[in-house]
Amino acid sequence: MRIAKAMARAGLCSRRDAERWIADGRVSVNGQVIRSPALDVSPADKILVDGKPLQGAEPAKLWRYHKPRGLVTTHRDPEGRETVFDKLPGNLGRVISVGRLDVTSEGLLLITNDGALARHLELPATGWLRRYRVRAHGRITQAALDRLKDGIAVEGVKYGPIEAVLDKEQGANVWLTISLREGKNREVRKVLGALGLDVNRLIRISYGPFQLLDLPPGVVEPVRRRVLIEQLGARLARDLGLMDVADAERDRRTSARDRARQDRNAGSIGKQDDKA
């Protein structure tokens, strides 16, 4: 594993920050100060950052978060607005978001401590469906929405196939369910705007297999490691350190069962000796 990735996986900083720290001479490996991130390291290497030992890499973790409206999905906002990360519990450590929801959007936002996991989940090639409930001002027919299945170009930007269902009309608004796989910047708003609809509420209700369900606004909830492994597959899960943790947990459970079995057997033998 490259040294910068090892530092990021340990939750110390981002990979980009790690590269800067290395260039500044703040990192040493096996007693030698390094200046280039082009170095592979292993658990056997002694890595110091600012003279302190680098802790072991945290396994990848994922959380579901119900983002409320009014929060910016960024770590620092130049306009001084509150961010998602201002509201997250401090015990999560250093985390990043999987993609973004704009300031007026709400709903499911995935949070992770691992940049490699975030990049994998964001890739269109991953093929995970994003589903939204949308309220928009205006009128539209299902026939017009069906044409989005072939994709659409808006202001020179090509958007892929979109599935849109007209759920109901409510006063001057319509409610839609929108499903897409690309998730380009403000895609739902721009595409519906091209159809004459003005989006005034946008709620992401699912991202791939992960769903918002009844998670209250502002609440964050961990995705179970077993579920994450099932969704990622064994190969990627092992690369992210998930399988090592799962193997260790299985070994602990096996050891506990073995000890309990030995205790039961010892008790049975003791009772037989008493009878003798």
Image (cartoon, rainbow, N blue to C red):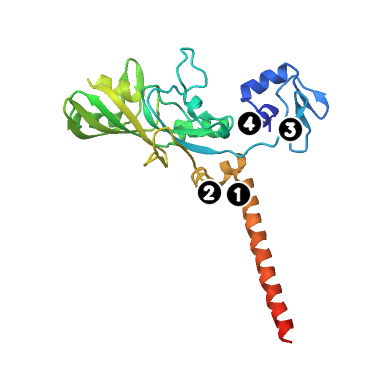
Rounded to the nearest whole Å, what is the CA distance between mark 2 and mark 4? 22 Å
| Lower position in the chain sequence, tag 1 or tag 2 | 2
Q: Which residue is mark 4?
A: 11
Q: Are marks 4 and 3 in contact (CB under 8 Å)?
A: no
Tell me the amino acid under the disc marked 3. Answer: Val
Tell me the amino acid under the disc marked 1. Answer: Ala
Q: Is residue 150 left or right of residue 43?
A: left
Q: Nearer the viewer, mark 2 or mark 4?
A: 4
Q: Which residue is mark 1?
A: 246
In the depicted structure, whether residue 174 falls above or below residue 23: below
Rounded to the nearest whole Å, what is the CA distance between mark 4 and mark 3? 16 Å
Please provide percent x and percent y for residue 119. 52, 30
Which residue is painted at 34% across and 15% down in the image? Answer: 156
Rounded to the nearest whole Å, what is the CA distance between mark 1 and mark 2? 8 Å
Q: Secondary structure at mark 4?
A: loop
State the residue in front, 205 or 36. 205
Disc number placed over residue 127 in the picture, else none: none
Q: Is residue 196 left or right of residue 207?
A: left
Q: Secondary structure at mark 2?
A: helix
Q: Which residue is mark 3?
A: 41
Question: Dot 1, crowdedness within 10 Å: few (<14), some or many (≥20)?
Answer: some
Q: Secondary structure at mark 3?
A: loop
Q: Which residue is mark 2?
A: 226
Q: Nearer the viewer, mark 2 or mark 3?
A: 2
- Residue at the farthest front position: 274
Q: Are marks 1 and 2 in contact (CB under 8 Å)?
A: yes
| Lower position in the chain sequence, tag 4 or tag 3 | 4
| Lower position in the chain sequence, tag 3 or tag 1 | 3
| Lower position in the chain sequence, tag 1 or tag 4 | 4
| Lower position in the chain sequence, tag 2 or tag 3 | 3
